[in-house]
Every structure is written in structure tokens, then in C-alpha cells.
Image: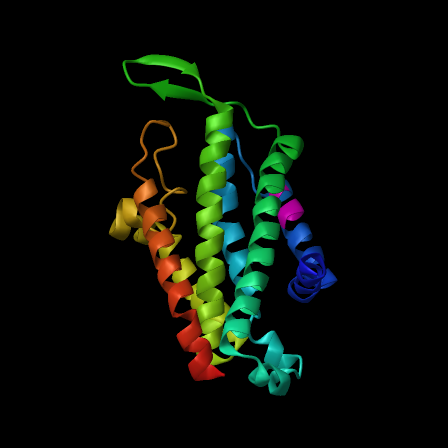
Amino acid sequence: MMKSKWKNEWKISLPVYKIAYSLSFVVILSLIRGVSYSNEVGIAMEAPMAILAAVLCADTYTQEITGKRSEVWRLYPMRNKVTAVMERLAVQEVFLFLLSALGYGLFFLFQRPVFWNTYIPGGEQGTGNEAVQFAFYLAAAAVSLVFWGLLSNTLACLMRNMWAGAGGCLILWLITNSTVGDQCFGAWNLFSYAFRNIEDMSDLSWMRGKVMCLCISVIMAAILPKILKKRG
């Protein structure tokens, strides 16, 4: 029963066209976005995957309206509505996370960046730990995907329009994924990982921005029932 339910949510959340354009996006990105060193791959991936999450998740709620299922949707108990939206978000987020890991590998396949010799405090140079670097990327990517996916869905729920969700995210994305955003917010920037000091892996101040993203994501998830109740 549970397996059948998740299979149904997968079909609703990830139709073929979404899977196709997401895969195409990652492949094209890994081909055209130039990187020279391995520690630049995460930077090249994080922001594009964030906006992809915003676009992919924008219709998580509104598809019930555009799919002409709103009358049936209104009959669902509120708990069922919230559960359905969260499950569909989870399906999309897991897909995007796996896609982020795949995209990271594609950069090494297509562009073969040079492994970075990470600076070690004390003046010595040592070979950077690629496994740790990849783990940091996955952690940052997971938080970014959850934040931007939830934000897009939350805005779409409030406005009852997926374009409002995606458009609102795009405006914030342009502000924070910029030099101005880095100068204004520093380590608290939404893209603190992308603007981190890539020459020093021991500098973990970028985690402040990710912790903030995580906290805001928890708040958005908590107020989702109230938004759904108000917007129907």
C-alpha cells in the first residue's frame, strides 16, 4: 500500500517532461560552465541547482488547480492535503539531490578539473581531501535545494500561482547570488557556500548561511498547514 502510494506521488510530482528538462539542464551545465580546479565544481553547481529546485517545485501545490482537480482537493481533510504536498516535495527534493551528485561527477567526466592543493594553516601545501570537499558540497546542496524548493512552493501557495512562486525566487536568487549580495550578507548569505574562501577548507564560516536557510525552511514547513487552510 505504502509503495503504491509513493509510486503515485512520484508520477504526479515528476512527470517525464520534468525529468527530461532537469537532466538536460545538468548535462548542459557540466558542458558549458568552465571550471579549472576541483574546488570550483561546487560553486558552479549550487546556484543553478537552486533555481532549478525553485522551478521544479513551484507547481507542487498549484498542479491541483491547473490539473482541474481543485474540487476534489477541497474535499480532502487538511492533514491529507499537508501530507500530500510534503510527500511530493520530498520526492522532488530527493530527485534533485541525486541529480546534484550526478552533476558534480559529470564535471569531472567532461572537464577533468585539476585536483586542488588545499592550503594548510602553517604555510605547507597538501593534497586536498576530495571526499571531504564532496561531502561539504552535498551538505550545502541539500540545504539549498530544500530552502529554494520550499520557498517556491510557499510563494505559489500564497499567490495560488506557480509563476509567482518561481518569479519571487528568481528575484531573491539574483540579489543573493551576486557580488552585492556577498558584500551585504557575507557568511549569512543564502549562497555562502558559493562565496566561501575556496583556498581554505578549514574556514567553515559559510555554514552560518546554510544554518539560516535550514531554520527558515523549518519555519516555512511549519506554516504550510495554515497557508493551505487559508488558500484552499
Query: Going 39% across and 48% down the picture, which residue do you hit?
Result: 191
Query: Going 47% across and 54% down the picture, which residue do you hit?
Result: 146
x then y, percent, for residue 77: 53, 79
x then y, percent, for residue 184: 25, 52
From this viewpoint, which residue is outermost toward the bottom?
A: 71
Along the line of sight, the residue nearer the viewer: 107 or 225: 225
Q: Is residue 105 left or right of residue 127?
A: right
From this viewpoint, which residue is outermost toward the front?
A: 1
The answer to whether residue 37 is visible is no
Along the line of sight, the residue nearer the viewer: 87 or 212: 87
- Give the magenta part as a residue range: 26-30
Q: Is residue 56 left or right of residue 15?
A: left
Q: Is residue 138 magenta?
A: no
Q: Is residue 186 left or right of residue 149?
A: left
The answer to whether residue 42 is visible is yes
**Quick one: quadrant of the N terminus?**
bottom right
Query: Going 51% across and 29% down the picture, which residue do you hit?
Result: 38
Residue 231, compared with residue 91, is above or below; it is below
Q: Quadrant of residue 192?
A: top left
Task: Identify the main secondary structure in magenta.
Answer: helix
